[in-house]
Amino acid sequence: MAEEIAMPRLGWTMEEGTLVEWLKTEGDQVEAGEILFTVESDKALNEIETFSGGILCIPPDAPQPGDTVPVGTLLGYLLEPGETMPVRTQPAEPTPMATASQKTDPHSTPSIHPTSPATATTDPAISPRARRIATELGLDWHQIKGCGRTGRIVERDIRAASAKTTSPSGRVRELIAGRLSQSQHETVAVTLTTEADATELVNLRAELKVAQGATAPTFNHLFAKLSAVALGEHPLVNSSWQDGQTHLHSEIHLSIAVDTEDGLLTPVIRNAASKSLNQIATEARDLALRARRRTLNPTAMQGGTFTITNLGIYGIDAFTPVINLPQAAILGLGRIIEKPAVYQGQVVPRALITLSLTFDHRILDGGPAANFLDRVRTFIEDPSLWLEEEH
């Protein structure tokens, strides 16, 4: 009996989806568990697998790749050998024959898993969606190296190639996107969180603003300086995973995450431990400005040994940062918010902040990582411990 293939509902709020591409062609034999097609919802790109087997039949009036259709729309059939396509008079209801296998990185395109060998051709294999986007961008895709399984060119390859032809920041975005995607698959990531009393750090920032005005270091610059001092005391955190083993770095090169219109970039403050707070502030401002103006060179992104990322300006308390390979760890900073806290035996308002340290368990055990995070907490609560390093 013919089994209908319909646009699946991939979430409670999903009302429609875009058919990206079929990974099987008309007349192909499909086995249960194979990836049949890909769908783009409002949240992610999803690989749809079938729980049944049969011969794929796509009606002539079925939605084409690139079409956005309501949930339940008929896309095709799975037929038994010798069976003919049924005449359909009613729209399909959402069918449970398909499920989504979603990637965890919402900014990247999942790898496609074709199940039949590619036909020999002089041109590289390319997905219909990637071909359409390349045409829209006026991009020659024939020399592009695909990152999909068997070298297939997918949308991510087209976007990356287009970015490289526009500006240095495009090459930077490709670099950081590749690292973050790789991090999800290669690291043994563990995240520790703790809360710090940032009241004294807030007071220090206020004093610096009075003394220096608009040029005073920001909280990010303060965090960068105190982290550099803490890394000097915990050198294993300032290391990386290279060629299957831990590599300790003699210098501390801080990668500072900068949010731009083109995405998150991480320019590097080199030799941060040997620089004063004001030097770090000046260099960080320059790097952030170049990142937002799209004049940041790829070399400014390379060689970092530890990353700091701050989502506090967006009202975020805690999150799980992604390790910037090949670095061992990344420090995530939440917002500084005044809350009731026990201080010197009394419940009083204090400025609190949540710290999140994600580390690669191949390099660090929980104890050394926790000791480092605790030292950062201590430096936040008592800035005099690291301000002495300024003299």
Image: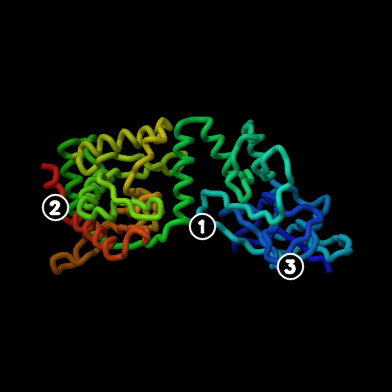
- Mark in front: 2 vs 3: 3
The count of marks equals 3
Q: Do the residues bearing badges 2 and 3 touch, measured as CB atoms within 8 Å?
A: no
Q: Which residue is mark 1?
A: 104
Q: Residue at x 16, y 51 (%)?
A: 383
Question: Observer-nearest residue: 210 or 355?
Answer: 355
Which image quadrant for residue 365? bottom left
Q: Which residue is mark 3?
A: 52
Q: Position of residue 69 (x, y in %)?
A: 70, 52
Give me the C-alpha separation between circle 1 and circle 3: 26 Å
**Residue type highlighted by circle 3:** Ser
Q: Secondary structure at mark 2?
A: helix
If you read the primary sequence from the N terminus, does the residue marked by circle 2 or circle 1 appear first?
1
Which image quadrant for residue 145? top right
Mark 2, residues whose alpha carbon is within 10 Å: few (<14), some, or many (≥20)?
few
Q: Residue at x 74, y 46 (%)?
A: 119
Give me the C-alpha separation between circle 2 and circle 1: 40 Å
Residue 121 appears anywhere in the view: yes
Q: Secondary structure at mark 3?
A: loop
**Residue type highlighted by circle 1:** Thr
Q: Is residue 259 above or below residue 31?
A: above
Q: Is residue 250 rendered to the left or right of residue 23?
A: left
Q: Position of residue 137 (x, y in %)?
A: 62, 33
Q: Which residue is mark 2?
A: 385
If you read the primary sequence from the N terminus, does the residue marked by circle 2 or circle 3 appear first?
3
Mark 1, residues whose alpha carbon is within 10 Å: few (<14), some, or many (≥20)?
few
The coloring applied to the image is: rainbow
